[in-house]
Amino acid sequence: MAGSMLSDSSMTSLAAVQAQIAHCQQCLEAGYPIQGPPIFSGDAQARLMVVGQAPGVSEVTKTHLPFSGSAGARLFRWLGQAGWPEAAFRSSFYITSVTKCFPGPNKSGRGDRAPTRAEQRLCGEWLDAEITLVDPEVLVPVGKMAIDRFFGRGRKLVDLIGNRFQLEGRIVIPLPHPSGASAWIQKPDHQALIRQAIAQLQQVKKELDL
């Protein structure tokens, strides 16, 4: 991509890509009010990767761990129901997001600002590199933005959540965004779909011995 910081030589290891991400200035130079540091965690040999939307303020100012705020607490409740305690999950698998830095608060004062499509494109090379280098067997996109990244825009969550897909040789099991502000996850019919998604994760955990 034009203006890309990613070079062929940096693709030799995940650590090299992560170092590049840590020094990326593309969104700031384009005028977006993001706040770092970039947030991601996990091992290069991880067999499962979670991809969220973007870090929240607590992730970049306090914990420096992905999904460590209130939304993360709900996500790890779901994963716990699938059979993974939080500490074991974090130590075994890779967690990242479509955009790596906190996008800032929403102008309405409610929640975080959603990264623009331009920001997603600027940050997209990093996610592509992470997926290539980690090469997970299972991808878990969390939230509409992450799901759109793999399935394209226009797909309804009700048609995706609760199902298991095979995309480019990987198992993909989408989850909705676990934010407490999400009206989607409060509906009984949607909660049933979430339970189906958790059951899919349980099955994959058993099949692949994850």
Image (cartoon, rainbow, N blue to C red):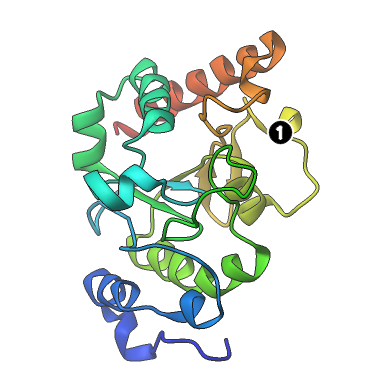
Image quadrant where one finds the N terminus: bottom right
Does residue 60 appear left or right of residue 97 in this picture? left
Q: Residue at x 32, y 19 (%)?
A: 83
Locate the C terminus and report the quarter of the image it occupies. top left
**Residue shown at 31% from the left, 37% from the top:** 68
Residue 46, horizontal then vertical, whole percent: 28, 50
**Residue drawn 42% across the image and 71% down it:** 129
Choose top left, top right, bottom left or bottom right for residue 90: top left
Q: Dot 1: few (<14), some (14–19), or many (≥20) neighbours within 10 Å?
A: some
Question: Which residue is pictured at 35% across the width and 34% down the height?
Answer: 69
Q: Position of residue 133 (x, y in %)?
A: 35, 67
Where does the image place residue 141, in percent across and percent down from the top left?
52, 44
Which residue in the structure is indicated by mark 1?
A: 157
Element type at mark 1: helix
Quadrant assignment, res 111: top right
Looking at numbered disc 1 in the image, what kind of residue is underneath it?
Leu
Classify 132 as above or below 69: below
